[in-house]
Image (cartoon, rainbow, N blue to C red):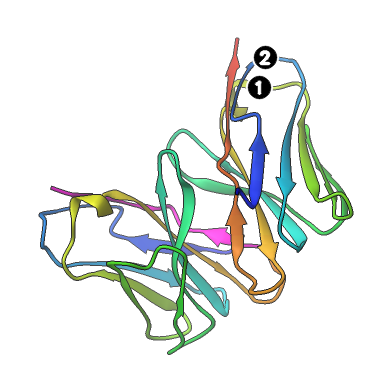
Amino acid sequence: GDQVKQSPSALSLQEGTNSALRCNFSIATTTVQWFLQNPRGSLMNLFYLVPGTKENGRLKSTFNSKESYSTLHIRDAQLEDSGTYFCAAVNTGNYKYVFGAGTRLKVIA
Amino acid sequence: EAAVTQSPRNKVTVTGGNVTLSCRQTNSHNYMYWYRQDTGHGLRLIHYSYGAGNLQIGDVPDGYKATRTTQEDFFLLLELASPSQTSLYFCASRLGGLNTLYFGAGTRLSVL
């Protein structure tokens, strides 16, 4: 089965609203990374997390290692937030990054 | 932010052709990776390396070779390209252990 499962797979948000994306892990991991792939295809780092919470502007992410999940909260969504959000977990056995399938987000005016 | 440079950005070749994709990072990172991205599959690891001269097999290695010639340079080789290798290829690097992964801008490869 999927080692890193993202939900939802796709999402449409009205500009100015809030939402949360989620990753569930079935591998042993102590770090999580979130990326945004913009419509041009570039992959940008959003967060690198050990267990805990980080915040950057309108984005906040939490990693709960005991319950094996991470969330990415988007506050006051803007058109430029559109793209595909990926989470990746570091497999502590071999240091490989295992990626989720992504959440495609479209923010509409 | 760490810089990872891929070349070429776009490549078209024919079935059976020979292709080399290049990746360079000047961040003194130890680990370098090659991924492919296809609709419905997300990012899949082809090969990776812990340092110059080292090569590790990824999850989808068939049809690909890789070589890490220096700390900075990691190459992906397709010696007999097939249409199934049409994809978006990403190189990535990180310092080591548990550190942030940085991606290049990607190479779009079409095999006709």
Q: Distance between the residues labelled 1 and 2?
A: 5 Å
Which image quarter holds the C terminus of chain A? Answer: top right
Tell me the crowding category of disc 1: few under 14, some 14 to 19, or many 20 or more residues within 10 angstroms, Cα based: some
- Residue A63 coordinates in the image, percent (x, y): 83, 49
Q: Residue at x 31, y 53 (%)?
A: B9
- Residue B19 coordinates in the image, percent (x, y): 20, 65
Q: Residue at x 89, y 54 (%)?
A: A66
Marks 1 and 2 share the same chain:
yes
Q: Residue A4 in magenta?
A: no
Return the chain for callout 1: A
**Quick one: SS at disc 2?**
loop
User: Which of the two labelled residues, at mark 1 and mark 2, occupies the earlier sequence position?
Assistant: 2
> A51 or B108, which is in the foreground?
A51
> A7 or A40, which is in the foreground?
A7
Q: Which residue is drawn at 61% across and 48% down?
A: A2
Tag of residue A15: 2
Left or right of A44? Residue B77 is left
What is the three-letter code of the residue carrying label 1? Gln
Q: Residue B105 in magenta?
A: yes
Tag of residue A78: 1
Residue that extends furthest to the bottom in the rendered view of this protein: B53
Left or right of A36? Residue A26 is right
Q: Give the range drawn in magenta.
A: B100-112
